[in-house]
């Protein structure tokens, strides 16, 4: 079984930029309860950074980075055994092609993860429904779920079935999920969460921002409360836009800017 969120710290060591020159950042520790966003323009290396974490890179990827777990090279079962892997990665392109119901899919995953928790399938669906406005039912086909439903179910699965202490979320804000609810829930559970994002609100909700450019880590920013006022205003704007989006979805004609 994977270690609990209280037992694992991942450290990412620098590799090389796209031009082959060395990266210069200090090793980045990812510990229980951390929320980290990865920002930068398209093609700057954001997804490559989380891919290195997901595969526990040992200078064997294009970036040349090295990833240690609790200061050591991760054991082979972390990489090869789904029941032991402490990392779950969910992308905006996650899609299930198996023609299974949600319940069948989750029960199959429960078996591979050796999860013996009672009612875990029902609890997973209930949690997923806290993250999406489109209700998920146990008998729905996985292949028929929307993007937002699929991502919401995968996040809930990672939390309750995989019990992964580290979650890597790649641009999930584009998938129609309640991002604030997701972030709040994962913080409460002291998961280590890394977001690849273009969303200013998600970025500002994170305790650290890793800024990418040219395939390399350019900077690691800790706002340390300096953005509190801006964060409050961005949150208001984000909620206004979400309300406007829902009005448009249900067929309202927007005659003014009152959310």
Image (tube, rainbow, N blue to C red):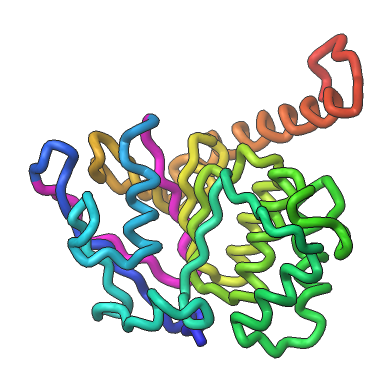
Q: Position of residue 41 (x, y in %)?
A: 37, 30
The secondary structure making up most of the magenta span is loop
Residue at 73 percent across and 68 percent down: it is: 105
**Residue 226 occupies quadrant:** top left
How many numbered marks does the figure carry?
0
Quarter of the image that includes the C terminus: top right
The correct choice, above or below, for 93 with respect to 136 in the image is: above
Q: Is residue 224 magenta?
A: no
Q: Which residues are magenta?
A: 22-41
The reply, left or right, for residue 243 in relation to residue 160 is right
Q: Nearer the viewer, residue 80 or 40?
A: 80
Q: Residue furthest front?
A: 99
Q: Is residue 30 magenta?
A: yes
**Residue 147 occupies quadrant:** top right
Residue at 57 percent across and 38 percent down: it is: 201
Q: Nearer the viewer, residue 155 or 70?
A: 155
Q: Residue furthest left?
A: 21
Q: Residue furthest bottom?
A: 116
The reply, left or right, for residue 221 in relation to residue 94 is left
Q: Position of residue 45 (x, y in %)?
A: 32, 41
The correct choice, above or below, for 238 with respect to 55 in the image is: above
The reply, left or right, for residue 178 in relation to residue 31 is right
Residue at 59 percent across and 75 percent down: it is: 162
Residue at 35 percent across and 64 percent down: it is: 55
The correct choice, above or below, for 3 with respect to 42 in the image is: below
Q: Position of residue 64 (x, y in %)?
A: 18, 55
Q: Position of residue 91 (x, y in %)?
A: 54, 49
**Residue 69 occupies quadrant:** bottom left
């Amino acid at each position: 079984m994977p270690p609990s969120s209280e037992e694992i710290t991942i450290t990412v060591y620098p590799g090389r930029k796209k031009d082959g020159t060395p990266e210069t950042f200090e090793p980045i520790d990812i510990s229980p309860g951390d929320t980290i966003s990865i920002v930068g323009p398209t093609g700057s290396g954001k997804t490559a950074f989380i891919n290195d974490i997901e595969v526990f890179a040992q200078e064997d990827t294009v970036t040349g980075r090295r990833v240690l777990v609790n200061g050591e090279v991760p054991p082979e079962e972390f990489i090869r055994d789904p029941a032991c892997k402490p990392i779950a990665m969910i992308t905006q392109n996650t899609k299930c092609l198996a023609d299974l119901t949600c319940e069948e899919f989750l029960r199959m995953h429960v078996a591979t993860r050796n999860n013996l928790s009672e009612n875990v399938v029902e609890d997973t669906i209930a949690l997923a429904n806290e993250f999406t406005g489109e209700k998920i039912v146990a008998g729905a086909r996985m292949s028929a779920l929307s993007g937002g439903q699929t991502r919401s179910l995968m996040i809930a699965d990672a939390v309750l079935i995989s019990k992964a202490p580290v979650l890597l979320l790649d641009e999930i804000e584009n998938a129609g999920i309640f991002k604030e609810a997701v972030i709040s829930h994962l913080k409460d559970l002291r998961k280590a969460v890394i977001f690849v994002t273009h969303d200013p609100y998600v970025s500002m909700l994170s305790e650290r921002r890793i800024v990418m450019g040219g395939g390399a880590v350019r900077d690691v920013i800790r706002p340390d409360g300096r953005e509190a006022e801006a964060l409050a205003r961005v949150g208001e704007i984000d909620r206004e836009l979400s309300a406007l989006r829902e009005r448009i979805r249900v067929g309202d004609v927007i005659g003014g800017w009152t959310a």
